[in-house]
Amino acid sequence: MSGASDMSQVRDLTKRSVYFLTSTALGSSPANRNPYGHGNAVSDFLSNVSRFKIIESTLREGEQFANAFFDTQKKIEIARALDEFGVDYIELTNPCASEQSRLDCEAICKLGLKAKILTHIRCHMDDARIAVATGVDGVDVMIGTSSLMRQHSHGKDIEYIKKTAIEVINFVKSQGIEVRFSTEDSFRSDLVDLLSIYSAVDQVGVNRVGVADTIGCASPRQVYELIRVLRGVVSCDIETHFHDDAGCAIANAYCALEAGATHIDTSVLGIGERNGITPLGGLMARMVATHPEYVKSKYRLEKIKDLEDLVAEAVQINIPFNNYITGFCAFTHKAGIHAKAILNDPSTYEIINPADFGMTRYVHFASRLTGWNAIRSRAQQLNISMTDKQYKECTHKIKALADIRPIAIDDADSIIRAYYRNIQSGENNPLMDLTAEEAAQFAMKEKEPGGLTSA
Ligand code: HCA
Ligand code: CU
């Protein structure tokens, strides 16, 4: 067996050995019940889980992704797609980064999108002047406040940061547009420093303060606690930005909303600095699972696949197999026990309805884990009707073959067909072409009592 090509064959087989079951072929739930509802989501007066806004940063944070290079046309295409999806804000790279960045920012402002256009700047008057001249609806200002950032990044003290922040905020507001002030590396900043800066900018009328987990160190509980405290200190909106270095970016975003944050930063597929930030699709999965009405009424969820494909192609990556919603196996059910329940009522093993995202579910039936319910359903799709006893016997044969080698849809289909032909003709022809060695193994396996046939 030689490694790479065998692996790719197995991957191919795996891809082919799933099949689509239409939702009409599946058991339906009573109309008066939301099969995906939980009724156990925590909700209180602070929580914004059912009224949050998205600040989409694929064209800012995402441009910091290792592979990203967006030319003007690609930026426009992505901005339009994000707008159609329904994000509230689109954040763009600092126009001071390069002349082309400035021109692109102006071009996107002129598109007349529904989403508000923001640009992201350092806390500096030079940046602020250039930003407001681009025609944006708002400016996101940020500066590092942790001692590490202060030492190694800009070298300024807290009083200087406060003074400059107020100057920049007053200037941007005087131009009649929105302004947000955020502290980079918030979770490693001194809490007293943080609250004193946020409170000072709140008092001069900043529209939002931003909390950024720049290095991805925060845990959901730390997020909840910081945002909860901040909610009691400022009256403006609270935006949050979570990096995913330790795998908490979605959970942190959710906890931030529970604690009273109002805005979440995302990027498509999470692309950004290092391994990125809260992914837009993953956040949608989290939110639709608990607050479907808000999410479904506000965002065009069925567009997520195209949006992700667009960005994945632009930055030359594949969609990961386990991606939220769109990963190739996100709605694939394999074990016989799962398949049986899914065929009766999909919500048994799904918290998200794939149809909400324009996706379809698959029941994997060509494997040793399959069960007779999945095989019966597949046979019916092939217009073959048998008795339950016969479906079970046929399933036994498929499982026996799948014990010998990986099988594809075609293999399982031909066994079903051949088995049915034998029943009708009363003959006992071989069910499929096998090598002598395989045939011998199959004959032995067939005699074994067989795995779980109850599902
Ligand atoms: C960075 C900046 C930032 C800014 C977030 C914000 C971060 O790339 O270092 O403006 O709130 O993660 O801190 O993306
Ligand atoms: Cu960031």
Image (cartoon, rainbow, N blue to C red):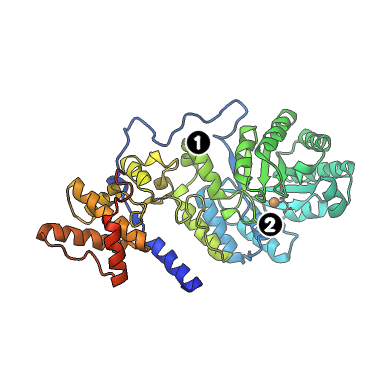
Residue 60 visible, this angle: no
Say if 100 sits above or below 124 in the image: below
In this rendering, position of residue 216 left or right of residue 377 = right
Q: Which residue is mark 2?
A: 273
In this rendering, position of residue 257 left or right of residue 202 = left
Q: Position of residue 315 (x, y in %)?
A: 59, 64
Q: Residue at the spot x=20%, y=62% of the render? A: 418
Say if 201 sits above or below 389 in the image: above
What amino acid type should be assigned to the residue bearing mark 2? Answer: Glu
Q: Residue at the spot x=54%, y=47% of the render? A: 282
Q: Residue at the spot x=31%, y=32% of the render? A: 30
Task: Give the Cα separation between the discs numbered 2 and 1.
Answer: 29 Å
Determine the secondary structure under disc 2. Answer: loop
Q: Which residue is mark 1?
A: 290
Q: Position of residue 170 (x, y in %)?
A: 79, 42
Q: Position of residue 47 (x, y in %)?
A: 60, 30
Of the two numbered discs 2 and 1 on the same chain, state the one appearing first in sequence. Answer: 2
Q: Is mark 2 within 8 Å of ligand 1?
A: yes
What amino acid type should be assigned to the residue bearing mark 1? Answer: Thr
In this rendering, position of residue 323 left or right of residue 348 = right
Badge number at residue 47: none
Determine the secondary structure under disc 1. Answer: helix
